[in-house]
Amino acid sequence: MDRKIPEETIIRLSYYLRALFYFTEENKKVVSSRQLADFLKISPHQLRKDLSYFGQFGKKGVGYSCPKLIDNIKEILGLEREWSACVVGFGNLGRALSFYKGFRDQGICIKAAFDVDKNKQNKTIKDITVYPLEKIKSIIKKQNITIAIITVPKESAKQIAKILYESGIRAILNFAPIKLDVPEEVILKDVDFTCQLTYLTYRLKLLEKED
Amino acid sequence: MDRKIPEETIIRLSYYLRALFYFTEENKKVVSSRQLADFLKISPHQLRKDLSYFGQFGKKGVGYSCPKLIDNIKEILGLEREWSACVVGFGNLGRALSFYKGFRDQGICIKAAFDVDKNKQNKTIKDITVYPLEKIKSIIKKQNITIAIITVPKESAKQIAKILYESGIRAILNFAPIKLDVPEEVILKDVDFTCQLTYLTYRLKLLEKED
DNA sequence: TAGATTGTTAATCGATTAACAATC
DNA sequence: TAGATTGTTAATCGATTAACAATC
């Protein structure tokens, strides 16, 4: 694992994992790179190239064992163990992420939520308790939380990020539409709906021009 | 506009727009590529390169006029006019997207929502009415909706996509964790939280190995 | 053995970075 | 004029695609 691995490759590994779950549910024990790739609408070359960064997982002339490749990819992505996460901002988006089942399937467990709104605080829904912001530090320590998801308005996002990394958070998934300042050692990933939607309007406009 | 323009460039244009809104709020009339780039934590070269795909918008030795560049980027992204969209699936995520203010600021207006759940149907919250799925076709036609956002469970996503493009939808933002089959002329963009989170666990695991 | 499919190298393609001439 | 900053070309870097030898 000396060469630099593209971020796109890592993202695709998640997709491969999901496809493997699907084929496993369909009672398939072995799949070829072509079957996986067709399911995900990518090329089999790309799948094999992506896997080759990490080792040799298939059998020539045969394909990949579903359960084995699942274990291998989980190991690569760090999903062989459980991770604890929290959500800051318990609006609609915060709630959606808190209760999203897809995370737990992959070993990522939302352990707590935080919100400024007193009416939301100290209530527990489906195992997740909403705490006031003042409790961020203590709960993170107590519950051993390493990942935080930020869904607060952009006005308070920078301040929340500061509290989070000062509390020991080492990775942040940020849904607030603003660039956060975090220390180099904190891993930050932005998710931005508006940009994605705007890409659609751009393409729609292009199409109209062609006509 | 003969050369192929990278998707990344289009996504960044949205970020430039947002930065320009920020500087405008701060009463700045003119900004340099360096100021914009610093704000967004990218390089000024990249910003200038991105803009150069579409024309010359700045003044050498001076910088860019904020209001003019805003108008130019809006025009490029098709945001000089209003777009009508709908949300299918009125769970927490559907609600979050329906009421998200960031869209309306950019001229994208959620006009209707749809859900299978009878308890959610025929209620109007903040100008958005939730209709049964059977009404998808008629509402889309009546309200002139071109963009759809899918937030239903993966089990029903493919079927919903079919109903949508058969109803005249031309662009889909898909939050369901499954690859949809759509005709070539329908523009499709996937958003996947799990992949983003998993990228964080991958990086966290890498860090631990280094120690 | 013949057919199938992997893993990897080489070729291509595309995006980013850097440098600088043009010019406000 | 001198300083600043754009727009664009060239160089670099990186990712994807394709081809094929290895081998189950």
Image (cartoon, coloured by chain):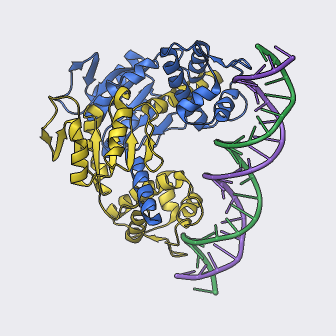
Chain colours: A yellow, B blue, C green, D purple
Q: Nearer the viewer, residue A173 or B156?
A: A173
Q: Is residue A139 visible?
A: yes
Q: Residue at x 47, y 59 (%)?
A: A36
Residue C21 found in image quarter: top right
Q: Is residue A211 visible?
A: no
Q: Image check: B170 left or right of B98?
A: right
Q: Image check: B7 left or right of B103?
A: right
Q: Image check: B139 left or right of B207?
A: left
Q: Residue at x 56, y 23 (%)?
A: B77
Q: Nearer the viewer, residue B28 or B88?
A: B28
Quarter of the image that includes the C terminus of chain B: bottom left
Quarter of the image that includes the N terminus of chain B: top right
**A57 above or below A77?**
below
Q: How many marks?
A: 0
**A46 above or below A174?**
below
Report x, y in % for residue B176: 36, 42
Report x, y in % for residue A153: 34, 28
**B43 above or below A15?**
above
Q: Residue at x 65, y 31 (%)?
A: B50
Report x, y in % for residue C5: 54, 69
Report x, y in % for residue B87: 34, 28
Judged from this view, the residue extending furthest toward the left is A123
Q: Residue at x 51, y 76 (%)?
A: A59
**A12 above or below B49?**
below
